[in-house]
Image (tube, grey):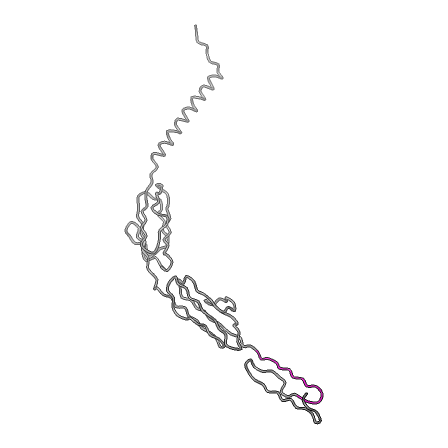
Amino acid sequence: MLPVPYSNEAMKWLARGCFLALLASFLLFSSARLAASATYYTITTTAGANGSISPTNPSVLRGNDQTFAITPDSCYYSVSSVLVDGSSVGAVTSYTFSNVRAAHTISASFTASAGTFTLTSSAGAGGTITASGSVSCGGSKTFTITPNSCYSISSVLVDGVSVGAVTSYTFSNVTAAHTISASFTAAGPYTITASAGSGGTITATGSVSCGGSKTFTITPNSCYSIS
């Protein structure tokens, strides 16, 4: 019995199926080869005391770039040195490995601050500020602003910027030197208004400074007495 021949249309579909199967096999094989050939390199990070390097020990795909941030801790004001593969690149705060094709190392050291910072205060005429002096890095210090008698606080400036007419101000988590200054406004003068009814007079109507004195004389007219 002779085999039944395929129609032209069936042959076309069979050919298409074979092509798609071969293409799928090729793509699967290529993907597996690419996955097997993907190479990653570790960049080892080392940060000294009082700072950090980020990210930590990443694995980088061959040919890619990797950027690191070098950050000193609070109260440690600067990066001292950064070494890449053992060679100094300066006191940088970031570094990028470009087109990575090998393992690398990056390390950083940090310089501690002076330890204390000076807080300078100044008061204008008419009042005082207490508590000038130094404070340890990361510490706090409160200043009290007090007007003299017959004065009020006009303005308080911290590092040259107004914080209002406050009576106290606290520097918190100090990591730099600062200044604080206060100005004051005199109260008065005050007007003392005198008036006398018929039959007498009062002398010395006028104004007087805050805290000052003024004497008034009350004089009855002839044939009158002070009631």
Magenta stretch, residue numbers = 188-201
Viewer-nearest residue: 78 or 18:
78
Q: Residue furthest top?
A: 1
Viewer-nearest residue: 102 or 46:
46
Q: Residue furthest bottom?
A: 222
Q: Taking 141 as reference, is 36 above or below it?
A: above
Give the tally of numbered discs.
0
Q: Position of residue 71 (x, y in %)?
A: 37, 54
Residue at 55 percent of width and 83 percent of height: 212
Tell me the quadrant of the picture where the C terminus can be found.
bottom right
Instruction: Report the magenta stretch's main SS.
Output: loop
Residue at 41 percent of width and 64 percent of height: 140
Does the magenta run of residues contain 195?
yes
Viewer-nearest residue: 8 or 68:
68
Residue at 63 percent of width and 85 percent of height: 205
Tell me the quadrant of the picture where the N terminus can be found.
top left
Q: Taking 63 as reference, is 148 above or below it?
A: below
Q: Position of residue 218 (x, y in %)?
A: 64, 89
Q: Position of residue 45 (x, y in %)?
A: 32, 49
Q: Position of residue 123 (x, y in %)?
A: 46, 74
Does the magenta run of residues contain 151?
no
Q: Residue furthest left?
A: 86
Residue 147 falls left or right of residue 195 = left
Q: Residue furthest front?
A: 227
Q: Taking 117 as reference, is 198 above or below it?
A: below
Residue 113 falls left or right of residue 195 = left
